[in-house]
């Protein structure tokens, strides 16, 4: 599963990255897709506990519009 959120600024992205490193989840961070005004931040999670942890990191960093996306079982990533 992926947790995705919309960051409004570079400082929000930096806060997410710092907090993911502190939580030991930085290796799950897939980066961001930056648009003209916002950035889509993506983190892969293994279970509900990580999902909730990443959601809290996003919320504490000011990231809004949090979404979840299930993995495609026909296209597993290694």
Image (cartoon, rainbow, N blue to C red):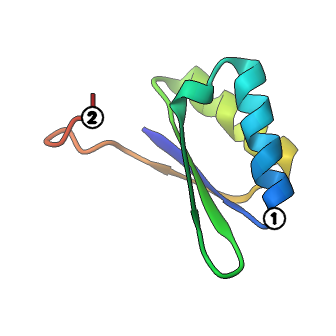
In depth, the one of 8 and 74 nearer the eye is 8
Q: Residue at x 71, y 30 (%)?
A: 20
Q: How many marks?
A: 2
Secondary structure category for the residue under label 2? loop
Q: Left of 10 or right of it: where is 32? A: left
Q: Which residue is mark 2?
A: 77
Q: Which residue matches tag 1?
A: 9
Mark 1 and mark 2: span between their CA atoms? 29 Å
* Circle 1 Cα neighbour tier, 10 Å, few/some/many (<14 / 14–19 / ≥20): some
Q: Residues within 10 Å of mark 2 (few under 14, many from 20)?
A: few
Relative depth, front residue between 75 and 32? 32
* Residue that protrudes farthest toward the bottom in the picture: 36
Q: Is residue 74 above or below residue 25?
A: below
On residue 32, the disc is none
Q: Is residue 60 left or right of residue 37?
A: right
**Which picture quadrant has residue 75?**
top left
* Side of 20 where 10 appears, left or right: right
Vertical arrangement, residue 28 with respect to residue 72, above or below: above
Quarter of the rendering occupied by the C terminus: top left
Q: Residue at x 75, y 51 (%)?
A: 13
Residue beneath the point at 75% across and 42% down: 16
Q: Position of residue 1 (x, y in %)?
A: 42, 38
User: In the picture, residue 58 is in which quadrant?
Assistant: top right
Tags 1 and 2 in contact by the CB under 8 Å rule? Answer: no
Q: Can residue 56 be seen here?
A: no
Residue at 83 percent across and 43 percent down: it is: 15
Percent across and percent down for residue 41 are 61, 53
Element type at mark 1: loop
Question: Which residue, as the protein is rendered here, is positioned at the far top?
Answer: 24
Residue 63's spot in the image, x, y percent?
A: 76, 55
């Amino acid at each position: 599963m992926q947790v995705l959120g919309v960051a409004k600024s570079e400082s929000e992205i930096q806060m997410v990255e710092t907090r993911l490193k502190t939580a030991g989840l930085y290796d799950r961070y897939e980066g961001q897709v930056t648009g003209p005004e916002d950035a889509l931040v993506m983190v892969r999670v293994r279970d509900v506990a990580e999902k909730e942890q990443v959601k809290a990191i996003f919320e504490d960093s000011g990231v809004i519009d949090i979404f979840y996306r299930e993995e495609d079982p026909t296209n597993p990533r290694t």
